[in-house]
Amino acid sequence: MKSIGIVIPAYNEKDNILKLVKSIRKKLSCIIIIVDDSSNIDIQKILLKNKLKNIKYFNRGKKSGRGSAVLFGFKKLIYFKKNINCLIEMDADLSHSPTELKRNINYFYNNSLDLLIASRYLKNSSIINWPLSRRILSKLSNTLARNLLGVPVNDYTNGFRFYSNAAAKKIISKCNKTGGGFIILSEIILVLWKNNFKISEIKTIFRNRIRGESSVNLKLIIDSLIGLFKLYLIKKS
């Protein structure tokens, strides 16, 4: 029996969260965990006002990193649904489309995968409305990650992913060694690859956010680069 849960890490995403949750609900019946690192509880107020069910909301009170928010959410999913067999992470900014959920879940189950990545860099994928600077930075980051870590995937940094229960438990216990931000996305791939989990990719349409501001900044970029080299050393050890 399929048991599915979605973790949505959020930081100042009150303008997007309601539309995202309602879109997910139209496509899928599942438990949703929202891990909010905002300094306010605006998202919680929105959820309560709209009486949305089967949603668990957690506010950590400060920005502690997207990656650590996902791991936190996975721990909660496994606690609430011990038999869960597909754990999903997706961004709160509407860059990942809920219309792809059912197709991706079917592909995940049909191929008995441990990690399925919605990859922006497959032949039939597309990126919409991203400025040239972000495209170049993302492409360079992924090229560097592939060269340093050597795992044969095309997209190390997209956070639209599907995990088996075993894979989720592995990354909860082994990841978060290089910082709590986006670098965990690459760390997860390396950890699962080294432990012989089955990884695959699927095409996706990635849309740049319309509302709100991206949390990506120079410090985060530098921290991610440092983290990549730490992962390289871990790989070699």
Image: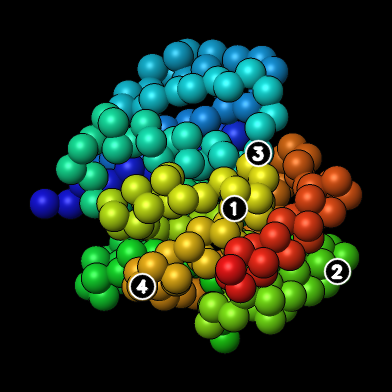
Quadrant location, the C terminus: bottom right
- In terms of image quadrants, where is residue 194? bottom left
The image shows residue 68 at horizontal and vertical percentages of 57, 39
Look at discs 1 and 4 and give the one toward the viewer: 4
**Which is nearer the eye, 123 or 75?**
75
The image shows residue 97 at horizontal and vertical percentages of 51, 55
The image shows residue 145 at horizontal and vertical percentages of 68, 72
Q: Kindly check if marks 3 and 1 are in contact, taking CB atoms under 8 A apart as contact.
A: yes
Q: Could you tell me which residue is drawn at 82 percent across and 72 percent down?
A: 136
User: Does label 3 or label 2 sit earlier along the sequence?
Assistant: 3
Residues under labels 3 and 1: Cα distance? 9 Å
Residue 65 numbered tag: 3
What is the secondary structure assignment of the residue under circle 2?
helix
Q: 10 Å neighbourhood of mark 1: few (<14), some, or many (≥20)? A: many
Going by the numbered disc 4, the residue's amino acid type is Asn
Can residue 34 be seen here? The reply is yes
- In terms of image quadrants, where is residue 135? bottom right
What is the secondary structure assignment of the residue under circle 1?
helix
Residue position marked by numbered label 2 in the rendering: 132
User: Does label 4 or label 3 sit earlier along the sequence?
Assistant: 3
Going by the numbered disc 3, the residue's amino acid type is Gly
What is the secondary structure assignment of the residue under circle 4?
loop
Q: 10 Å neighbourhood of mark 2: few (<14), some, or many (≥20)? A: few
